[in-house]
Amino acid sequence: MKKRIAVAAAMTVLAASPAFASGYRIPEQSINATALANASVAHTPNADASYYNPANMSWLDKSAQAEASLTWIQLTSIDYTDNAMANRNGASKDEDFVLPNLHLVSPAYGNWRFGLSVVYPYGLSKQWTSSFARTTAEEFTLKTHEFNPTVSYKFNEMFSIGGGARVIYTTGKVKSNGTIPATTVGGNTVYSTIARDMDGDTTEYGYNLAATFKPISNLSFAATYRSKVDLDVEGDAVLTSSQGFLGNGTAVSALPAGSYRGTTSVSVPAPAVLTFAAAYTCNSGKTTAELAYDKTYWNAYDQLDFNYASALGHPVLTAAFDNPKAKNWSNSDAFRIGLTHKLTEQWTVMAGFAIDKTPAPDSTLGFELPDSDAKIYSCGLRYQPAANLQLGLAYLYDDKESRTVTNANGLNGTFDNSAAHLLTAGLQYRF
């Protein structure tokens, strides 16, 4: 399969804002996960246990189960207000996406269960139209498709383990176009217009592990781990820079145009995630509360370093696209709580709340990664019209904090109004 560079560029330069979790991670991949702000690890009564905690497949009804859902995602426009130059102000585009998800769990085979989930665990998209922002982030889009076959084994009524393989197929696109100060000649600033256009795909592999301990029937402790997956992308890139020119438009022969069309490679992480969770059911089995803690190991993303088949051979192209760029992300924490209450035999309501920390430091923040700390609010319901069928609907609002930054990337301003809306609808069926 031919691999291209855009995936890596999109992932690594943009940590932005589909923003359902820190960086470009998207935890919400089922009805329950959306409704409970992803506090859906220790208590997983549906087929999405295959993805969120395969060890819990051991305690599902012994019949085969399936969940299919669609999630509509809206990314709001982000406003940037510059503190010094009003002509640098701008806003990103509103964007909408629809993602399907599928979870399957086999019947019980003794103490063994098998599952399969098809999910979209990472993703981002950001498009800017203002000239200042477009120089680095005209368009950055990342889509991932994960196939996650899983298995569980129940030792006894108190303890079960599970795990699986991660197969991640990724596509992406990156474009930028703008004018930068390139050098000085005779004391005058010389400018150059630079552009890049990349797109491509890759397939990579990892694993996940899970364990659940139930000291009593209504109390569960769970731990899950998803491995880091290095996206080692190889592909093609088209890079250009114009002949140098002065502020009045006069061409400068001392800085000729440059271009590169050829192969390139880069390695970036889809980070490891460690989760601990506890769930307790009370009120005669009607109410369940879950607390969950995530640590995402974003410290694996310390720099962005593209490699090319040959030297770019041009000072502007080298500075803009070849020199390693420090990222220095830190590990991020998320704290989640989810409540599930069975109103009647047919109706169940859910609600969740989470605090999610950004991994991106001020020093590397830019238009490609206007991420910030977030508070997450969610709710949902399930309706059971028949013994083997449930319908579900869930909503989540991800509210990003405003962030003011002054750094060496040329930023001296504030990002506002960053948010995401998720609406998930689907069904759960037992065979």
Image (cartoon, rainbow, N blue to C red):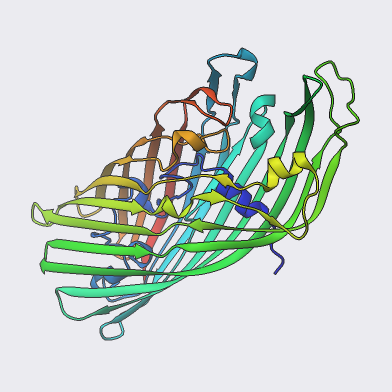
Residue drawn where x is 8% and y is 56% of the image:
284
Left or right: 242, with 175 as reference point: right
Q: Position of residue 56 (x, y in %)?
A: 27, 68
Residue drawn where x is 72% and y is 66% of the image:
2
Q: Residue 316's quadrant in the figure?
A: top right
Q: Is residue 233 visible?
A: yes
Left or right: 215, with 324 as reference point: left
Compared to residue 136, the image places residue 236 above or below, namely: below
Residue drawn where x is 40% and y is 40% of the image:
358
Quarter placement of the N terminus: bottom right
Q: Is residue 47 visible?
A: no
Left or right: 39, with 134 as reference point: left
Compared to residue 151, the image places residue 314 above or below, namely: above
Q: Position of residue 33 (x, y in %)?
A: 35, 52
Quarter placement of the C terminus: bottom left
Q: Residue 318's quadrant in the figure?
A: top right
Q: Position of residue 326 (x, y in %)?
A: 53, 44
Q: In the image shown, does 151 or 87 lie closer to the viewer? A: 87
Q: Position of residue 406 (x, y in %)?
A: 50, 25
**Name of the residue lying farthest toward the bottom:** 110
Residue drawn where x is 69% and y is 45% of the image:
321
Q: How many marks?
A: 0
Q: In the image shown, does 16 or 350 lie closer to the viewer? A: 16
Q: In the image shown, does 173 or 361 lie closer to the viewer? A: 361
Compared to residue 51, the image places residue 362 above or below, namely: above
Q: In the image shown, does 221 or 359 lie closer to the viewer? A: 359
